[in-house]
Amino acid sequence: MSETGTYVYAVGRNIDEEPLTGLEGVGDAPVRLLGHRELTAVVSSVDLAEFGEAALRRNLENLSWVEKTARRHDEIVRRAAAITTALAPFRLVTIYKSDDAARVRLEELYGDLVRALDRVERRSEWSVKAFCRVRPGPSAPSAPAGSGVAYLERRRAEIRDRHEAATEQQLLADQLFWDLVPAAAATRRLSAQDQRLSGRRETMALNVAFLVDDDRSTDFFELVDATRARYPSLDVEVNGPWPPYSFAVLDKP
């Protein structure tokens, strides 16, 4: 039999194993629980021929492998989040040599884990993105009219107008963010997504994760819906609730 390691998906409190029974993790091994003090890690065994250090260096260059693994990882985290009030997701492919090695690391991280779980207790993550709506510009002349100097002046004016419009929309996106801040327990502004990830051609002016109390989720969604009407030049997307990836994942799990 191949050597195996312990893949850790997340750590939480008061997780019942029964709802996870029969659930398969990455590599199709059964998901199980690993206790340490009052904490519970959601784990599965993985074949180190595929998930060992050398194999991972190869597999992480394979986009289809990464996508498949990330989907299964996220599915396990979501299933676990649905049956506990506080969950700290771990990063993709967090693997230890054994259950004992995983417990040793949980002890090393114990204080950070407790603080992370306290922070996200009975809270979930919501994503708000704002895209700049495309504004119709003046149609370009079929050929430059007048002198070359006049043509260059028109081009400079067009560039200046586009820059001013982009600056205005960024300021509006910032104001949208501050309109929503009071409804959240915490926020995290993220970098704009690549168009290949967002699936949108428009410029992303805002990408924010909000940590929201579970009993205020409906209020938050309604606030976003009401607020977007004040910013017609922005196309605002809201998604959630999700496990609190942006607020509980540890930098060095």
Image (cartoon, helix red, strand yellow):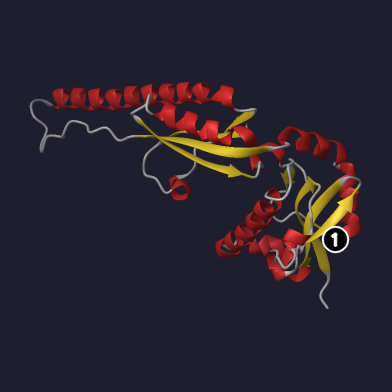
The foreground one among 85 and 104 is 85
- Can residue 213 be seen in the rendering of this structure? no
Q: Is residue 157 left or right of residue 179?
A: left
At label 1, counting other C-alpha atoms closer than 10 Å, the crowd grade (few under 14, some 14-19, many 20 or more) is some
| Residue lying at 16% horizontally and 27% vertically, measured from the top left | 151
| Residue lying at 58% horizontally and 22% vertically, measured from the top left | 182
Q: Which residue is mark 1?
A: 97
Write down the quadrant of residue 153 in the picture: top left
Vertical arrangement, residue 128 with respect to residue 156, above or below: below
**Residue 51 % position (x, y):** 73, 64
Amino acid residing under circle 1: Lys
| Residue lying at 69% horizontally and 64% vertically, measured from the top left | 26
Write down the quadrant of residue 131 in the picture: top left
- Mark 1 secondary-structure assignment: loop
Q: Is residue 63 left or right of residue 122?
A: left
Residue positioned most to the left:
146
| Residue lying at 8% horizontally and 29% vertically, measured from the top left | 145
Vertical arrangement, residue 240 with respect to residue 227, above or below: below
